[in-house]
Amino acid sequence: MYQPVIGLEIHSELKTKSKMFCSCLNNPDEIKPNTNICPICLGHPGTLPVINKEAVKKVIKTGIALNCRISEYSKFDRKNYFYPDLPKGYQISQYDMPLCGEGFLEIEGKKIRIRRIHLEEDTGRLIHENNYSLVDFNRAGIPLMELVTEPDISSGKEAREFAQELQLILRYLGVSEADMEKGQMRVEVNISLMDLDRNPRVLGTKVEVKNLNSFRAVEKAVEYETKRQEEVLCLGKKVVQETRGWNDIKGITVSQREKEEAHDYRYFPEPDLPPLYNSKEFIGGIKIEIPELPSEKRKRFKKEYNLDKKVIEVFVQNKDLSEYFEKVASEFNPGLKKEDFLKLVKLATNYLVTDLLGLMKGEQFIEEKCKIDPENFAEFISIIKEGKISSKIAKILLEEMFNTGKDPSQIIKDRGLIQLVDEDVLKKVIDEVLKENQLAVDNFKAGKVTAFQFLIGQVMAKTKGRANPKIVSDILKAKLTRG
Protein backbone atom coordinates (compact mmCIF):
# COMPACT_ATOMS: atom_id res chain seq x y z
CA MET A 1 0.00 0.00 0.00
CA TYR A 2 1.37 3.38 -1.00
CA GLN A 3 0.82 6.70 0.76
CA PRO A 4 1.43 9.96 -1.16
CA VAL A 5 3.75 12.39 0.60
CA ILE A 6 3.29 15.92 -0.73
CA GLY A 7 5.01 19.24 -0.21
CA LEU A 8 4.15 22.56 -1.84
CA GLU A 9 6.23 25.48 -3.08
CA ILE A 10 4.06 28.55 -3.57
CA HIS A 11 5.22 31.83 -5.09
CA SER A 12 3.14 34.99 -4.62
CA GLU A 13 3.75 38.40 -6.19
CA LEU A 14 3.56 41.07 -3.50
CA LYS A 15 1.33 44.12 -3.83
CA THR A 16 3.79 47.03 -3.57
CA LYS A 17 4.06 50.30 -5.49
CA SER A 18 7.59 49.64 -6.72
CA LYS A 19 9.76 46.66 -7.52
CA MET A 20 11.93 44.79 -5.04
CA PHE A 21 15.26 46.55 -5.56
CA CYS A 22 14.47 49.64 -7.67
CA SER A 23 11.85 52.37 -8.04
CA CYS A 24 10.23 50.95 -11.20
CA LEU A 25 6.45 50.56 -11.07
CA ASN A 26 5.25 47.17 -9.85
CA ASN A 27 2.65 46.51 -12.52
CA PRO A 28 2.86 42.96 -13.91
CA ASP A 29 -0.34 43.55 -15.92
CA GLU A 30 1.32 46.23 -18.09
CA ILE A 31 0.45 45.27 -21.67
CA LYS A 32 3.23 47.15 -23.45
CA PRO A 33 6.42 45.08 -23.00
CA ASN A 34 9.60 46.45 -21.42
CA THR A 35 7.93 49.63 -20.14
CA ASN A 36 8.55 49.43 -16.37
CA ILE A 37 12.30 48.83 -16.52
CA CYS A 38 15.54 50.53 -15.50
CA PRO A 39 19.28 49.70 -15.38
CA ILE A 40 18.85 48.11 -11.92
CA CYS A 41 16.13 45.58 -12.81
CA LEU A 42 17.88 44.91 -16.12
CA GLY A 43 21.08 44.07 -14.27
CA HIS A 44 23.35 46.62 -15.91
CA PRO A 45 26.94 46.67 -14.58
CA GLY A 46 27.63 49.19 -11.83
CA THR A 47 24.03 49.46 -10.60
CA LEU A 48 23.19 48.99 -6.92
CA PRO A 49 19.94 47.47 -5.57
CA VAL A 50 18.00 48.98 -2.65
CA ILE A 51 15.72 46.83 -0.45
CA ASN A 52 11.98 47.52 -0.64
CA LYS A 53 10.99 47.86 3.04
CA GLU A 54 7.29 47.42 2.31
CA ALA A 55 7.96 44.04 0.70
CA VAL A 56 9.90 42.92 3.77
CA LYS A 57 6.99 44.00 6.01
CA LYS A 58 4.50 42.06 3.88
CA VAL A 59 6.49 38.84 4.14
CA ILE A 60 6.84 39.24 7.91
CA LYS A 61 3.10 39.97 8.18
CA THR A 62 2.38 36.74 6.29
CA GLY A 63 4.77 34.85 8.55
CA ILE A 64 3.06 36.12 11.69
CA ALA A 65 -0.36 35.16 10.29
CA LEU A 66 0.98 31.66 9.59
CA ASN A 67 2.38 31.15 13.09
CA CYS A 68 6.01 31.40 11.92
CA ARG A 69 9.13 32.22 13.85
CA ILE A 70 10.28 35.62 12.57
CA SER A 71 14.04 35.97 12.18
CA GLU A 72 15.56 38.97 13.93
CA TYR A 73 18.56 38.61 11.60
CA SER A 74 18.20 37.83 7.90
CA LYS A 75 20.07 38.42 4.67
CA PHE A 76 19.82 38.17 0.89
CA ASP A 77 21.80 35.77 -1.28
CA ARG A 78 22.65 35.35 -4.93
CA LYS A 79 21.13 32.31 -6.59
CA ASN A 80 23.25 31.72 -9.65
CA TYR A 81 21.84 30.22 -12.84
CA PHE A 82 21.50 31.25 -16.45
CA TYR A 83 18.19 31.67 -18.22
CA PRO A 84 17.05 34.26 -20.82
CA ASP A 85 14.44 35.81 -18.46
CA LEU A 86 17.06 36.43 -15.74
CA PRO A 87 18.89 39.59 -16.80
CA LYS A 88 21.65 39.57 -14.17
CA GLY A 89 22.58 35.91 -14.61
CA TYR A 90 21.59 35.41 -10.97
CA GLN A 91 18.50 35.98 -8.83
CA ILE A 92 18.58 37.89 -5.56
CA SER A 93 16.87 35.55 -3.13
CA GLN A 94 17.32 34.14 0.40
CA TYR A 95 19.03 30.87 1.23
CA ASP A 96 20.06 29.93 4.75
CA MET A 97 18.54 32.89 6.63
CA PRO A 98 14.97 33.43 5.43
CA LEU A 99 12.69 36.01 7.01
CA CYS A 100 10.25 33.41 8.38
CA GLY A 101 10.39 29.76 9.37
CA GLU A 102 8.80 26.95 11.37
CA GLY A 103 5.14 27.92 11.01
CA PHE A 104 1.92 26.08 10.23
CA LEU A 105 -1.50 26.45 8.64
CA GLU A 106 -4.40 24.40 9.96
CA ILE A 107 -6.60 22.70 7.34
CA GLU A 108 -9.68 20.83 8.59
CA GLY A 109 -8.07 20.35 12.00
CA LYS A 110 -4.72 19.16 10.62
CA LYS A 111 -1.59 21.30 10.98
CA ILE A 112 0.42 21.57 7.76
CA ARG A 113 3.89 22.69 8.76
CA ILE A 114 5.60 25.55 6.92
CA ARG A 115 9.34 25.16 6.55
CA ARG A 116 10.16 28.70 5.42
CA ILE A 117 8.88 31.89 3.81
CA HIS A 118 11.47 33.98 2.04
CA LEU A 119 11.67 37.02 -0.22
CA GLU A 120 13.18 37.26 -3.68
CA GLU A 121 12.77 39.03 -7.02
CA ASP A 122 10.67 37.70 -9.88
CA THR A 123 12.07 36.93 -13.32
CA GLY A 124 11.02 38.32 -16.68
CA ARG A 125 8.41 36.72 -18.91
CA LEU A 126 9.25 34.65 -22.00
CA ILE A 127 6.93 34.81 -25.00
CA HIS A 128 7.37 32.01 -27.51
CA GLU A 129 6.26 32.70 -31.08
CA ASN A 130 6.83 30.38 -34.05
CA ASN A 131 10.58 29.66 -34.13
CA TYR A 132 11.78 32.43 -31.82
CA SER A 133 11.30 33.76 -28.27
CA LEU A 134 10.87 37.28 -26.87
CA VAL A 135 11.55 38.56 -23.36
CA ASP A 136 9.40 41.07 -21.47
CA PHE A 137 11.22 42.43 -18.41
CA ASN A 138 8.23 44.29 -16.90
CA ARG A 139 7.88 41.48 -14.35
CA ALA A 140 11.62 41.22 -13.64
CA GLY A 141 12.39 42.51 -10.16
CA ILE A 142 8.83 42.39 -8.79
CA PRO A 143 8.82 41.34 -5.09
CA LEU A 144 8.14 37.61 -4.92
CA MET A 145 7.39 35.68 -1.74
CA GLU A 146 8.09 31.95 -1.69
CA LEU A 147 6.47 29.65 0.85
CA VAL A 148 7.70 26.07 1.27
CA THR A 149 5.74 23.50 3.26
CA GLU A 150 6.99 20.37 4.92
CA PRO A 151 5.83 17.13 3.20
CA ASP A 152 2.77 16.92 5.48
CA ILE A 153 0.09 16.85 2.78
CA SER A 154 -1.39 13.48 1.89
CA SER A 155 -3.93 14.08 -0.90
CA GLY A 156 -4.82 16.29 -3.84
CA LYS A 157 -7.84 17.63 -1.96
CA GLU A 158 -5.65 18.66 0.98
CA ALA A 159 -3.15 20.35 -1.35
CA ARG A 160 -5.96 22.31 -3.02
CA GLU A 161 -7.47 23.35 0.32
CA PHE A 162 -4.08 24.52 1.61
CA ALA A 163 -3.51 26.68 -1.48
CA GLN A 164 -7.06 28.09 -1.34
CA GLU A 165 -6.78 28.98 2.35
CA LEU A 166 -3.38 30.60 1.77
CA GLN A 167 -4.83 32.70 -1.05
CA LEU A 168 -7.60 33.89 1.29
CA ILE A 169 -5.09 34.81 4.00
CA LEU A 170 -2.90 36.75 1.54
CA ARG A 171 -5.94 38.72 0.38
CA TYR A 172 -7.16 39.41 3.93
CA LEU A 173 -3.68 40.66 4.82
CA GLY A 174 -3.56 42.81 1.68
CA VAL A 175 -0.10 41.51 0.78
CA SER A 176 -1.05 40.00 -2.61
CA GLU A 177 -4.05 39.62 -4.92
CA ALA A 178 -2.80 36.04 -5.41
CA ASP A 179 -4.75 35.62 -8.66
CA MET A 180 -3.62 32.31 -10.15
CA GLU A 181 -5.02 33.12 -13.60
CA LYS A 182 -2.78 36.19 -13.76
CA GLY A 183 0.27 34.34 -12.43
CA GLN A 184 0.26 36.30 -9.16
CA MET A 185 0.23 33.00 -7.29
CA ARG A 186 2.04 29.93 -8.64
CA VAL A 187 1.93 26.50 -7.07
CA GLU A 188 4.46 23.71 -7.57
CA VAL A 189 3.88 20.27 -6.10
CA ASN A 190 6.51 17.78 -4.90
CA ILE A 191 5.16 14.23 -4.72
CA SER A 192 6.66 10.95 -3.60
CA LEU A 193 5.11 7.67 -2.50
CA MET A 194 5.80 5.94 0.79
CA ASP A 195 5.52 2.13 0.86
CA LEU A 196 3.56 1.58 4.07
CA ASP A 197 4.06 -2.21 3.96
CA ARG A 198 7.83 -2.35 3.38
CA ASN A 199 9.40 1.00 4.35
CA PRO A 200 6.83 3.11 6.21
CA ARG A 201 9.43 5.68 7.28
CA VAL A 202 11.31 6.04 3.99
CA LEU A 203 10.19 8.57 1.37
CA GLY A 204 10.19 7.47 -2.26
CA THR A 205 11.73 9.33 -5.19
CA LYS A 206 10.46 12.91 -5.41
CA VAL A 207 8.85 14.27 -8.57
CA GLU A 208 8.14 17.98 -9.03
CA VAL A 209 5.06 19.08 -10.99
CA LYS A 210 4.87 22.59 -12.49
CA ASN A 211 2.43 24.60 -14.69
CA LEU A 212 -0.40 24.47 -12.14
CA ASN A 213 -2.47 27.57 -12.85
CA SER A 214 -5.65 26.73 -10.93
CA PHE A 215 -6.70 25.04 -7.69
CA ARG A 216 -8.43 22.36 -9.72
CA ALA A 217 -5.14 21.69 -11.53
CA VAL A 218 -3.35 21.32 -8.17
CA GLU A 219 -5.80 18.65 -7.01
CA LYS A 220 -5.99 16.80 -10.33
CA ALA A 221 -2.20 16.84 -10.86
CA VAL A 222 -1.61 15.27 -7.45
CA GLU A 223 -4.26 12.61 -8.09
CA TYR A 224 -2.85 11.75 -11.51
CA GLU A 225 0.80 11.74 -10.46
CA THR A 226 0.04 9.60 -7.40
CA LYS A 227 -1.67 7.03 -9.60
CA ARG A 228 1.12 7.16 -12.22
CA GLN A 229 3.88 6.57 -9.67
CA GLU A 230 1.92 3.76 -8.04
CA GLU A 231 1.55 2.02 -11.41
CA VAL A 232 5.30 2.38 -12.07
CA LEU A 233 6.15 0.82 -8.69
CA CYS A 234 3.61 -2.00 -9.09
CA LEU A 235 5.35 -2.97 -12.35
CA GLY A 236 8.60 -3.33 -10.41
CA LYS A 237 10.16 -0.25 -11.99
CA LYS A 238 11.74 2.80 -10.34
CA VAL A 239 10.25 6.29 -10.26
CA VAL A 240 12.59 8.73 -12.01
CA GLN A 241 13.50 11.93 -10.18
CA GLU A 242 12.35 14.61 -12.59
CA THR A 243 10.37 17.76 -13.22
CA ARG A 244 7.02 17.21 -14.91
CA GLY A 245 4.50 19.66 -16.32
CA TRP A 246 0.73 19.52 -16.06
CA ASN A 247 -1.27 19.28 -19.29
CA ASP A 248 -4.65 20.66 -18.27
CA ILE A 249 -6.37 19.68 -21.53
CA LYS A 250 -5.34 16.01 -21.37
CA GLY A 251 -5.38 15.87 -17.57
CA ILE A 252 -1.93 14.29 -17.34
CA THR A 253 1.59 15.14 -16.20
CA VAL A 254 4.34 15.09 -18.84
CA SER A 255 8.10 14.79 -18.38
CA GLN A 256 10.04 18.03 -18.84
CA ARG A 257 13.52 17.24 -17.59
CA GLU A 258 15.26 14.67 -15.40
CA LYS A 259 17.00 15.73 -12.21
CA GLU A 260 19.58 13.16 -11.19
CA GLU A 261 20.89 15.45 -8.45
CA ALA A 262 19.80 18.69 -6.86
CA HIS A 263 20.91 21.68 -8.93
CA ASP A 264 23.87 23.61 -7.50
CA TYR A 265 22.91 27.28 -7.55
CA ARG A 266 26.17 28.33 -5.85
CA TYR A 267 24.42 30.53 -3.30
CA PHE A 268 26.53 33.19 -1.64
CA PRO A 269 25.62 36.34 0.36
CA GLU A 270 24.51 39.27 -1.78
CA PRO A 271 27.47 41.71 -1.48
CA ASP A 272 25.49 44.79 -2.56
CA LEU A 273 22.81 44.55 0.14
CA PRO A 274 23.20 44.96 3.92
CA PRO A 275 21.88 42.28 6.30
CA LEU A 276 18.42 42.80 7.76
CA TYR A 277 17.92 43.37 11.48
CA ASN A 278 14.26 43.01 12.41
CA SER A 279 13.90 44.45 15.89
CA LYS A 280 11.17 43.28 18.27
CA GLU A 281 9.62 46.76 18.00
CA PHE A 282 9.54 46.51 14.19
CA ILE A 283 7.96 43.04 14.30
CA GLY A 284 5.53 44.15 17.02
CA GLY A 285 4.41 47.10 14.87
CA ILE A 286 3.60 44.72 12.01
CA LYS A 287 1.76 42.33 14.32
CA ILE A 288 -0.81 44.95 15.36
CA GLU A 289 -1.65 45.60 11.69
CA ILE A 290 -2.89 42.03 11.15
CA PRO A 291 -6.68 41.97 10.67
CA GLU A 292 -9.13 39.21 11.54
CA LEU A 293 -8.13 36.15 9.53
CA PRO A 294 -10.47 33.69 7.75
CA SER A 295 -10.25 31.00 10.48
CA GLU A 296 -11.09 33.57 13.17
CA LYS A 297 -13.99 34.94 11.13
CA ARG A 298 -15.47 31.44 10.73
CA LYS A 299 -15.49 30.94 14.50
CA ARG A 300 -16.89 34.40 15.25
CA PHE A 301 -19.67 34.21 12.66
CA LYS A 302 -20.78 30.88 14.10
CA LYS A 303 -20.70 32.21 17.67
CA GLU A 304 -22.33 35.62 17.05
CA TYR A 305 -24.79 34.85 14.25
CA ASN A 306 -25.28 31.07 14.47
CA LEU A 307 -24.93 30.75 10.69
CA ASP A 308 -24.54 27.39 8.99
CA LYS A 309 -21.20 26.33 7.53
CA LYS A 310 -22.06 26.97 3.87
CA VAL A 311 -23.28 30.52 4.49
CA ILE A 312 -20.25 31.30 6.65
CA GLU A 313 -17.98 30.10 3.86
CA VAL A 314 -19.71 32.42 1.35
CA PHE A 315 -18.99 35.36 3.67
CA VAL A 316 -15.41 34.26 4.39
CA GLN A 317 -14.68 33.90 0.68
CA ASN A 318 -16.14 37.36 -0.05
CA LYS A 319 -14.70 39.76 2.50
CA ASP A 320 -16.64 42.74 1.14
CA LEU A 321 -19.95 40.88 1.38
CA SER A 322 -19.23 39.81 4.97
CA GLU A 323 -18.50 43.41 5.99
CA TYR A 324 -21.71 44.57 4.28
CA PHE A 325 -23.68 41.85 6.11
CA GLU A 326 -22.32 43.00 9.47
CA LYS A 327 -23.31 46.60 8.70
CA VAL A 328 -26.82 45.36 7.89
CA ALA A 329 -26.97 43.37 11.13
CA SER A 330 -25.85 46.42 13.13
CA GLU A 331 -28.89 48.34 11.83
CA PHE A 332 -31.36 45.98 13.50
CA ASN A 333 -32.90 47.20 16.75
CA PRO A 334 -30.26 46.73 19.47
CA GLY A 335 -33.01 46.14 22.02
CA LEU A 336 -34.18 42.95 20.32
CA LYS A 337 -34.07 39.64 22.13
CA LYS A 338 -31.27 37.35 20.94
CA GLU A 339 -33.68 34.90 19.29
CA ASP A 340 -35.49 37.69 17.40
CA PHE A 341 -32.16 39.19 16.30
CA LEU A 342 -31.00 35.80 14.98
CA LYS A 343 -34.25 35.38 13.03
CA LEU A 344 -33.63 38.71 11.30
CA VAL A 345 -30.01 37.70 10.67
CA LYS A 346 -31.07 34.40 9.09
CA LEU A 347 -33.57 36.21 6.87
CA ALA A 348 -30.93 38.75 5.86
CA THR A 349 -28.37 36.08 4.97
CA ASN A 350 -30.94 34.25 2.83
CA TYR A 351 -31.67 37.38 0.79
CA LEU A 352 -28.00 38.39 0.62
CA VAL A 353 -26.55 35.03 -0.39
CA THR A 354 -29.38 33.92 -2.67
CA ASP A 355 -31.27 36.91 -4.06
CA LEU A 356 -28.77 39.77 -3.99
CA LEU A 357 -25.90 37.69 -5.36
CA GLY A 358 -28.35 36.29 -7.92
CA LEU A 359 -29.07 39.83 -9.16
CA MET A 360 -25.31 40.34 -9.56
CA LYS A 361 -25.21 37.45 -12.07
CA GLY A 362 -21.91 35.97 -10.98
CA GLU A 363 -20.02 39.21 -10.42
CA GLN A 364 -18.02 39.69 -7.22
CA PHE A 365 -19.85 41.77 -4.60
CA ILE A 366 -18.17 45.14 -4.04
CA GLU A 367 -19.96 47.39 -1.56
CA GLU A 368 -18.90 50.61 -3.31
CA LYS A 369 -20.70 49.45 -6.46
CA CYS A 370 -23.85 48.29 -4.66
CA LYS A 371 -26.66 50.86 -4.82
CA ILE A 372 -28.43 49.44 -1.76
CA ASP A 373 -26.92 50.88 1.40
CA PRO A 374 -26.88 48.66 4.54
CA GLU A 375 -29.54 50.77 6.29
CA ASN A 376 -32.01 50.29 3.42
CA PHE A 377 -31.27 46.57 3.22
CA ALA A 378 -31.91 46.22 6.96
CA GLU A 379 -35.22 48.11 6.52
CA PHE A 380 -36.12 45.77 3.65
CA ILE A 381 -35.55 42.73 5.89
CA SER A 382 -37.60 44.25 8.72
CA ILE A 383 -40.51 44.92 6.32
CA ILE A 384 -40.52 41.25 5.28
CA LYS A 385 -40.29 40.05 8.90
CA GLU A 386 -43.26 42.25 9.88
CA GLY A 387 -45.36 40.62 7.14
CA LYS A 388 -45.98 43.87 5.25
CA ILE A 389 -45.07 42.27 1.91
CA SER A 390 -45.12 38.73 0.54
CA SER A 391 -42.00 36.82 -0.54
CA LYS A 392 -42.96 37.36 -4.19
CA ILE A 393 -43.23 41.12 -3.70
CA ALA A 394 -39.96 41.05 -1.74
CA LYS A 395 -38.11 39.83 -4.84
CA ILE A 396 -39.67 42.60 -6.95
CA LEU A 397 -38.83 45.18 -4.28
CA LEU A 398 -35.22 44.01 -3.93
CA GLU A 399 -34.66 44.19 -7.67
CA GLU A 400 -36.03 47.73 -7.74
CA MET A 401 -33.73 48.70 -4.87
CA PHE A 402 -30.79 47.03 -6.63
CA ASN A 403 -31.40 48.99 -9.83
CA THR A 404 -32.27 52.38 -8.32
CA GLY A 405 -30.89 52.49 -4.77
CA LYS A 406 -34.21 53.88 -3.53
CA ASP A 407 -35.60 53.50 -0.01
CA PRO A 408 -37.81 50.32 0.23
CA SER A 409 -40.70 52.11 1.96
CA GLN A 410 -40.78 54.72 -0.79
CA ILE A 411 -40.85 52.07 -3.53
CA ILE A 412 -43.68 50.22 -1.76
CA LYS A 413 -45.68 53.46 -1.52
CA ASP A 414 -45.00 54.57 -5.09
CA ARG A 415 -45.80 51.18 -6.63
CA GLY A 416 -48.59 50.14 -4.27
CA LEU A 417 -46.83 46.98 -3.14
CA ILE A 418 -48.14 46.82 0.43
CA GLN A 419 -49.49 43.40 1.34
CA LEU A 420 -53.23 42.87 0.96
CA VAL A 421 -54.69 41.66 4.28
CA ASP A 422 -58.30 42.92 4.06
CA GLU A 423 -60.34 39.70 4.38
CA ASP A 424 -63.43 41.14 2.65
CA VAL A 425 -61.38 42.09 -0.41
CA LEU A 426 -59.59 38.73 -0.42
CA LYS A 427 -62.91 36.81 -0.13
CA LYS A 428 -64.18 38.51 -3.28
CA VAL A 429 -60.99 37.60 -5.17
CA ILE A 430 -61.17 34.01 -3.91
CA ASP A 431 -64.82 33.70 -4.98
CA GLU A 432 -63.81 34.81 -8.48
CA VAL A 433 -60.99 32.26 -8.57
CA LEU A 434 -63.25 29.43 -7.43
CA LYS A 435 -65.84 30.34 -10.04
CA GLU A 436 -63.23 30.45 -12.83
CA ASN A 437 -61.50 27.18 -11.80
CA GLN A 438 -64.28 24.65 -11.14
CA LEU A 439 -62.09 21.74 -12.31
CA ALA A 440 -59.44 22.54 -9.66
CA VAL A 441 -62.20 22.75 -7.04
CA ASP A 442 -63.50 19.30 -8.05
CA ASN A 443 -59.96 17.89 -8.03
CA PHE A 444 -59.39 19.20 -4.50
CA LYS A 445 -62.61 17.60 -3.29
CA ALA A 446 -61.49 14.37 -4.94
CA GLY A 447 -58.37 14.42 -2.75
CA LYS A 448 -55.78 16.04 -5.04
CA VAL A 449 -53.70 18.24 -2.71
CA THR A 450 -51.88 19.99 -5.57
CA ALA A 451 -55.18 21.57 -6.64
CA PHE A 452 -55.20 23.62 -3.44
CA GLN A 453 -51.77 25.11 -4.20
CA PHE A 454 -52.93 25.84 -7.73
CA LEU A 455 -55.89 27.83 -6.40
CA ILE A 456 -53.65 29.80 -4.03
CA GLY A 457 -51.39 30.57 -6.98
CA GLN A 458 -54.36 31.91 -8.94
CA VAL A 459 -55.30 34.22 -6.05
CA MET A 460 -51.73 35.48 -5.82
CA ALA A 461 -51.69 36.09 -9.56
CA LYS A 462 -54.95 38.08 -9.44
CA THR A 463 -53.59 40.24 -6.61
CA LYS A 464 -50.18 40.54 -8.33
CA GLY A 465 -48.47 38.86 -5.41
CA ARG A 466 -49.85 41.28 -2.82
CA ALA A 467 -52.22 38.90 -1.01
CA ASN A 468 -51.13 37.56 2.36
CA PRO A 469 -50.59 33.83 1.65
CA LYS A 470 -51.65 32.65 5.14
CA ILE A 471 -54.92 34.60 5.12
CA VAL A 472 -55.62 33.36 1.57
CA SER A 473 -54.94 29.76 2.64
CA ASP A 474 -57.26 30.02 5.66
CA ILE A 475 -60.16 31.59 3.72
CA LEU A 476 -59.77 29.20 0.79
CA LYS A 477 -59.67 26.15 3.04
CA ALA A 478 -62.81 27.30 4.89
CA LYS A 479 -64.74 27.88 1.65
CA LEU A 480 -63.71 24.56 0.08
CA THR A 481 -64.45 22.44 3.14
CA ARG A 482 -67.85 24.18 3.63
CA GLY A 483 -68.83 23.77 0.02
Image (cartoon, rainbow, N blue to C red):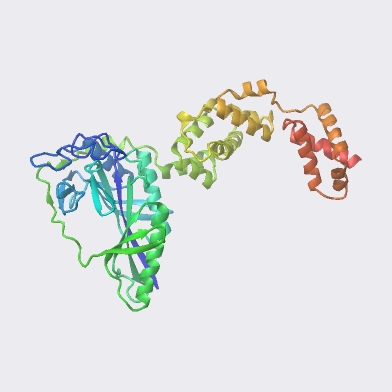
Above or below residue 389? Residue 95 is below
Q: Which residue in the rendered view is the most extreme toward the right? A: 483
Q: Is residue 122 visible in the rendered structure shown here?
A: no
Above or below residue 406? Residue 73 is below
Q: Nearer the viewer, residue 191 or 57?
A: 191
Residue at (30%, 43%) from the top-left corner? Answer: 62
How many numbered marks, from 0 up?
Answer: 0
Above or below residue 127? Residue 470 is above
Residue at (39%, 51%) from the top-left corner? Answer: 214
Residue 158: image location, x then y, percent: 41, 57
Residue 377: image location, x then y, percent: 56, 29
Q: Nearer the viewer, residue 393 or 285?
A: 393
Quadrant holding the N terminus: bottom left
Residue 469 figure quarter: top right
Q: Is residue 178 left or right of residue 365?
A: left
Above or below residue 321? Residue 149 is below
Q: Which residue in the rendered view is the most extreme toward the front? A: 130
Q: Is residue 96 left or right of residue 199?
A: left
Residue 406: image location, x then y, percent: 57, 23
Residue at (16%, 54%) from the top-left corner? Answer: 82
Quadrant holding the C terminus: top right
Q: Nearer the viewer, residue 274 or 104?
A: 274
